[in-house]
Image (spheres, grey):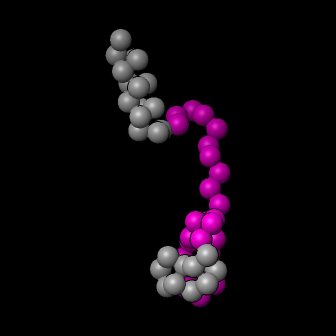
């Protein structure tokens, strides 16, 4: 029973233990060097167009 509860908590927390890691693509702002999400059109830090 406890194992099932732990599995449920991990699932709800969206943790992936022992599975294949998810690839995350980040874009580096040419002006300030901040990493931004792949679909960003403007830098989240300085507002410069990416």
Residue drawn at 41 percent across, 34 percent down: 12
Q: Is residue 7 left or right of residue 20?
A: left
Using the image, determine if residue 5 lies above or below residue 10: above
Magenta segment, prevailing SS (helix, strand or loop) = loop
Residue drawn at 55 percent across, 79 percent down: 43
Q: Is residue 2 magenta?
A: no
Q: Farthest residue toward the top?
A: 1
Magenta stretch: give its range: 16-40
Q: Is residue 31 magenta?
A: yes
Q: Position of residue 13 (x, y in %)?
A: 41, 38
Residue drawn at 64 percent across, 80 percent down: 50
Q: Position of residue 19 (x, y in %)?
A: 60, 34
Q: Position of residue 47 (x, y in %)?
A: 51, 84
Residue drawn at 63 percent across, 66 percent down: 39
In which quadrant of the rendered view does residue 31 lie?
A: bottom right
In which quadrant of the rendered view does residue 33 lie?
A: bottom right
The quarter of the picture where the N terminus appears is top left
Say which of 40 and 13 sits in front.
40
Q: Position of residue 7 (x, y in %)?
A: 43, 24
């Amino acid at each position: 029973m406890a194992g099932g509860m732990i599995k449920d908590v991990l699932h709800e927390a969206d943790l992936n233990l022992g599975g294949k890691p998810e690839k995350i693509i980040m874009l580096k702002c040419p002006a300030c060097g901040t990493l931004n999400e792949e679909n960003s059109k403007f830098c989240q830090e300085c507002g410069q167009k990416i």
